Image (cartoon, helix red, strand yellow):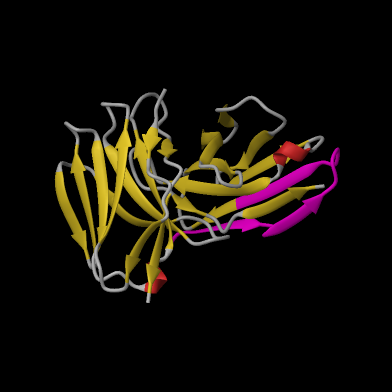
Amino acid sequence: QKEVEQNSGPLSVPEGAIASLNCTYSDRGSQSFFWYRQYSGKSPELIMSIYSNGDKEDGRFTAQLNKASQYVSLLIRDSQPSDSATYLCAVMTPSGYSTLTFGKGTMLLVSP
Amino acid sequence: SQTIHQWPATLVQPVGSPLSLECTVEGTSNPNLYWYRQAAGRGLQLLFYSIGIDQISSEVPQNLSASRPQDRQFILSSKKLLLSDSGFYLCAWTSGQGVEAFFGQGTRLTVV
């Protein structure tokens, strides 16, 4: 059974700090990895996708992937109160018809 | 550009009543379509996915069914709602396998 694990949080950081969100997955065959942000009462929106080992940067966001350790992370630099949300890690394994498996999410709180 | 529409945004239904939620995608052809449910305090649970018209797979056997009468239309239905059907229902689409999913605005269903 495919599993994606995240610490539920909340992770509290002060404004301007770096927030580090972590995710582990169980299926070693997973090849596509995504981070979504979900504000309370809203639908998830895609922040980052990463497909190969290493770092991928987009503005204040950096996704990191380590397939050997089955670990993916999201760093948010210069955190803002508007970043306060739940961050969902999603993993896709290309077996049969590919579907996304989501973690339960980590709640991030950025205090002014 | 591609857009996904989902309605209604909120719905309050009595136990035993029928349900029909609709989702349409614009700006793309032959999308993969998904229905997810997010219960309070829980992760996203995949309910149904479809790779084409009348090609639907169910991930979780339950009180719900799905249909895809047109290429870009996906419908979630129930003949008789249960209290346990309450939750946040999300429609999503992808352009293929191993790529990111995009979500509709979601439907908040409360069964009373």
In the image, residue A48 above or below residue B31: below
Q: Residue furthest bottom?
A: A112
Apparent side of residue B75 relative to residue A26 in the rendered image (left or right): right
Q: Is residue B18 found inside the magenta-colored segment of the image?
A: yes
- In the rendered image, residue A21 lying in the magenta stretch gets the answer no
Q: Vertical placement of A28 versus A84: above or below?
A: above
Residue B84: x percent and y percent?
A: 72, 37
In the image, residue B7 lies at what x, y percent?
67, 57
Q: Tag count in the figure? A: 0
Residue at horizontal 57%, vertical 30%? B56
Residue B83, picture quadrant: top right
- The residue sitting at the left extreme is A54
Rendered-image quadrant of the N terminus of chain B: bottom left
- x and y, in percent, of residue A59 in the image: 23, 68
Q: Which residues are magenta?
A: B1-23
> Is residue B54 shown left or right of residue B51?
right
Residue at 53%, 35% (x, y): give it.
B49
Front one among B67 and A34: A34
Q: Taken as a whole, is the magenta stretch helix, strand or loop?
A: strand
Which is more toward the observer, A81 or A45?
A81
Q: Residue at x 26, y 48 (%)?
A: A73
The front one of B61 and B48 is B61
In which quadrant of the rendered view does residue B76 lie? top right
Q: Residue at x 16, y 31 (%)?
A: A68
